[in-house]
Image (tube, rainbow, N blue to C red):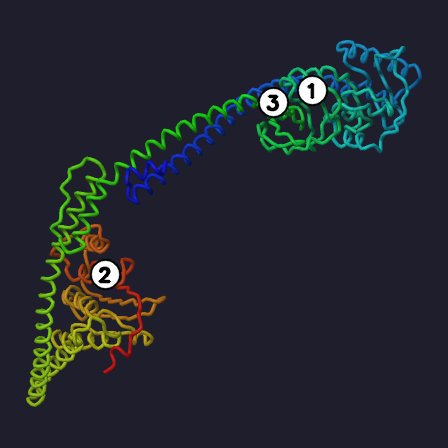
Amino acid sequence: MLSYMGKLKLPTVGVKVFVFFVASMLIIIAVMGYLFYDKSAEMMEDKIGGMALQNVQQMSKRIDILLEGYEDRSLLVVGNQEIQEQLVGRFRNETERIQNNNANTAFLSNLVNSRNDINDIYLLGEKGHSYHYSPKTSFPAYNAYANEFQDASWYKRIREADGEVVYFGIRPSLIRSGDPSPVFSFGRAEKDFSARGEIVGVLVYEIDPTEIVEILAEIDYNGSGMNVIVDDQGEIVGDKDGLRLAAELGVPLGEAHQGIFSTPMDGEQMLVVYNRLETNDWTLVGMLLGADLMKDAGSLRWYILSLGLAFSFIGILLAIFVASTVHRPLQKMIRAMRKAQNGDFDARIEDKREDEFGYLFVHFNQMVARIKELINELYVQKLLEQGLQLKMLGSQINAHFLYNTLDSIHWIARIHKVDDISTMIFGLSKYLRISLNEGRDEVSVSEVVQLLDSYIMIQKVRYRDKFSLHLHVDKSLEEYKVLKYIFQPLVENAIYHGLEKKSGKGRLDVAFIHDNGCLKFVVTDDGAGIASDKLSELQLILSGKRSEEGQHFALRNIHAQIHIAYGVQYGIQLQSSYGSGTEVTMTIPLARRNQSKHAG
C-alpha cells in the first residue's frame, strides 16, 4: 500500500487526508457495527422480554383470581356467627354446644366439598376453644385442638393484620411441625362481632398448592428459565418444584408495577421480568437465561463483522482515490499564496470549479484584492494622521492665544467694574482650560466638578435667579478618571429643556454618587418635564429599539460614547413627569486616576 502511494507522488497533505479518511472510516464502521449489533441484541432482548412479560402478566392475573377466591372463602368462615360462638364457647348447655358443632361441621363440609383443594382448616381460639377440620379425617367433625401458637411470629402477623388476609405462600404446614408436605397457607383474624369486633382467634387455611404450581410451570422458556413468587422482603414463597422456597431471590426489583431488566446471577446473565400482584404485596418474577435466548445474536455478530471488513477494503480504495485527486488544486493555491507572500497582490487563481476548492479560490482572490485595497487605504490614513497632528499642534497654539485674550478681557471688565462680563469671561476661560485639557479625553472627577462649576457660573449670569444649584459630590470619587465630554450636556439639557420653560424659580440638583464600583451621575430638575409620548420615544432610542437620525443628538451621542468606552451594560436612564420635572441618571464604571501619567 505504501509503495503504491509513493508512485502516486502524493504531497504530505494527501497522506494526511488518506490516513485521516481511513482511520475515520474504520472507526465509523467499527462504531456503527457495534451499535447495530448492540441495538439488534437489545431489540431481540426487548422482544423476548416483552413476550415473557406478557406471559408473567397473564399468570399474575390467574394467580390474583385464585387468591381472590381464597379470600372470599375465608371471609365466609370468619363472618359466620355460629363459628364465632364456637370459638368463644358461649353455650347455655351441652345440647346447644353439640347443635352448634353439627351446624359448623355441615357448613365447613359444604365449603370444602365445593372446592376439593382444601387440606386443612384451623380455627385457633384464644379462650381455650380451638378446632380443626380436614376432609382427610375419617370423622368429619370438629376436633378439639390446643392453641399453642399465640407466641409464633406467623400468628402475630395474622393478628396484627386485624382481619385482613395474610399470605404465607407455599411452605410446610404452620401447625403440623415435622410434616414436610408443602401446602399453600394463609390466615386472617377471627372477630366476635357481638363484642365490638374483639379478636377471639385466627383462621388458618392450608390448601393444596398444585394449582399454583401448575400455573408457575406452564411456561419454562424452553427449559432456560423459571417463574417464582417473591414477597415484599425478596423471599421466594412459590416455585414450580419447591427447590427454592424460603430462599432469597438475590435480585433487587424496581419500584414500578412491572419491569424488564438484565442482571448477572450465579455467573450467568439473566433476563428478569416481573409483575406485581394486585391482591397482595407479592411479585411474580420470570427469569430467563440470556445465553440461551440470544443464540441468534452470534450469527448476527459474524455477519456484521464480515460486512465491516468488506466495506473497510472498499473504503481504503476510495481513500487512495480521494488523496490522489485532492493535491492538484492545493498546489495551485500554494503557488498563488507564495506569490502573495512575496508581495504580488495581483496574483489570482484562474480555475473555475463547482466544489469547495472553487469556493476557496474565489475567496482567496477576493481576499488578496481586499488586502491590496486595505494597504492603499492605510497609506492614505497615514497621510491624514500626519496632517491631523499638524492641525492639533496649531490648535494648541490657538488655544493658548485664546486663554491669554480671555484673561485680558476679564481684567479689563474688572477695571471697568462690569462684574457680569468679568464673571462670564472668567468662567468661560476656566471652562475652556479644563475642557481642552491638552487634548486628553479623560479627566478626574474633581476636574469634571470644576468644569460643571464654570459652566453653571456662566449660565447663572445669563439666567440671573432663574434657578438654584445644589451640588453633591462623594469625596471618594475625586481621584477617579472619566470621560470629560459626557457630563456637561446633561446639565445643559436640564437648564434649556426643563428650567428655562418653567415659570418662576427652579431647582437644579447635581449629584456624583459612588455605588457598588460605579459612578452614578444624577441630574434632577423641577422644570417643565417631558410628555409621556415623548418620554417613551426617548427611552426607546436609549434602549436601541428605535433610531431617529438628527433627533436628540446629545443624549444619543453620550449614550453611544458610554457603550463604546465602557460597555453596553452602562449608559443613561431617563425618568420624567410632565409638569413636575425630569431625572437623568448616567452610570459608568470607575477607574482610578494614574497620577504619574498626569503629573505636571
Circles 3, 2 touching at the beta carbon (< 8 Å): no
* Sequence order check, earlier mark of 1 and 3: 1
User: Which label sits on residue 564?
Assistant: 2
Along the viewing direction, whichever of 509 and 477 lies nearer the viewer: 477
**Residue 52 picture location, percent across and down:** 59, 21
Crowding at label 1, few (<14), some or many (≥20) Cα neighbours within 10 Å? Answer: many
Relative to residue 595, is residue 68 drawn left or right? right
Q: Which mark is residue 67?
A: 1
What is the C-alpha distance between the residues marked 1 and 3? Answer: 33 Å
Q: Residues within 10 Å of mark 3 (few under 14, many from 20)?
A: some
Image quadrant occupied by the N terminus:
top left
Residue type for callout 2: Ile
Q: Can you give x and y, in whole percent of width and height, for residue 577 in the image?
A: 23, 58
Residues packed near mark 2 inside 10 Å, few (<14), some (14 to 19) or many (20 plus)? few
Give the amino acid type for the residue marked by disc 1 in the picture.
Leu
Instruction: Give whichever of discs 3 and 2 has the lower sequence position.
Output: 3
Cβ–Cβ under 8 Å for marks 1 and 2: no
Kind of element beneath mark 2: helix
Q: Quadrant of the C terminus?
A: bottom left
At a point 63% along the width and 24% down the height, the residue shown is 286
Residue sitting at 62 percent across and 28 percent down?
Answer: 270
Residue drawn at x 18%, y 46% is: 364
Residue 436, compared with residue 314, is above or below; it is: below
Query: What is the C-alpha distance between the residues marked 1 and 2?
Result: 81 Å
First in sequence, mark 1 or 2: give its number.
Answer: 1
Q: Which residue is mark 3?
A: 292
Q: Residue at x 60, y 25 (%)?
A: 291
Q: Amino acid at mark 3?
A: Asp
Q: Which mark is residue 194?
A: none
Q: Position of residue 595 (x, y in %)?
A: 28, 78
Give the Cα distance between marks 3 and 2: 73 Å
